[in-house]
Amino acid sequence: MRNRQYIAAQAKIFKALGHPSRLLMVDALRDGEKCVCDLQALVGDDMSTVSRHLAVLREAGVVAADKRGTNIYYRLAICCLETFLDCTGKLVEQRALDQLGMLPKA
Amino acid sequence: MRNRQYIAAQAKIFKALGHPSRLLMVDALRDGEKCVCDLQALVGDDMSTVSRHLAVLREAGVVAADKRGTNIYYRLAICCLETFLDCTGKLVEQRALDQLGMLPKA
DNA sequence: TGTGTATTTTGTCAAAAAGACAAATAAACC
DNA sequence: GGTTTATTTGTCTTTTTGACAAAATACACA
């Protein structure tokens, strides 16, 4: 099923992951759920900015939240991230190595 | 290795995939390499727009290109896309179903 | 060499996203 | 009930992205 709407919804997921702060938070959530305050401390942005980023991730379906006590805890809602992050990580490393390999030419 | 630069480079990959036209092209490339003209026909955008999108994908390391004869052929440069697209696809489907389930409430 | 074809680059503009700050909300707890 | 704490929302400014058109490049081939 490769139609436009389907692709657009998938693109939304990728887009949500396509920001350093958001990816950093998502990456941290691999260790388990965290409250907004934890995530704020992690990325160091203004609280309102963090909240907005989290909203983007929620709307894309990447994370889910639930309130317990005083805090709101976020957790991953996407199961397969692990392998893909490993994969993109390898790609990043490979490209870094390739670029080192290119340097001698200059 | 979860540092900022590394995360940023990974975010760049996600960002590149986070556009409907780009994801559509990437998805099409799962079937094998295609020339720019094929991809342009596929997404239906202006040729210059397609070219820009391809540049984004290239710079993120998602695709690679080589010229043969008159045309430039693009292919996937990222191996693990298959499983992740299946996964995000399932997520999209699940969310669509969930939303249908929500409707009766309204 | 000249010509047509495929692709990329650049200019310009409109639209979307990010970030900062203040204000609002909500819920827990005294 | 009022205060504190955690989070979201409104609004504004700045930055980035995307689309289309026009110009430039590259290059195969007659």
Image (tube, coloured by chain):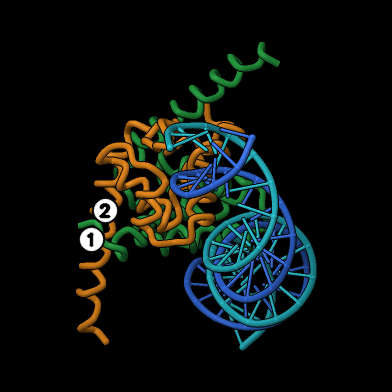
Chain colours: A green, B orange, C blue, D cyan
**Residue B15 visible, this orientation:** no
Instruction: From the image, tell me which residue sits under label 1.
Output: B93
Element assignment for label 2: helix
> Residue B103 at x, y = what percent?
23, 81
Tags 2 and 1 touching, CB below 8 Å = yes
Q: Is residue A104 above or below residue D8?
A: above
Q: Is residue C4 above or below residue A47?
A: above
Residue B89's label in the rendered image is: 2
Question: Dot 1, crowdedness within 10 Å: few (<14), some or many (≥20)?
Answer: some
> Which subunit holds the residue at mark 2?
B
In the foreground, B71 or A38: B71
Amino acid type assigned to the residue bearing label 1 in the image: Glu
| A33 sits to left or right of B11 | left
Residue at 39 percent of width and 62 percent of height: B44
Task: State the residue lying farthest toward the top.
Answer: A104
Q: Is residue A64 above or below residue C30?
A: above
C-alpha gap between disc 2 and disc 1: 6 Å
Residue at 31 percent of width and 66 percent of height: A5
In the foreground, B93 or A34: B93
| B48 sits to left or right of B71 | right
> Residue A53 at x, y = what percent?
54, 58
**Residue B94 visible, this orientation:** yes
In the foreground, B86 or B99: B86
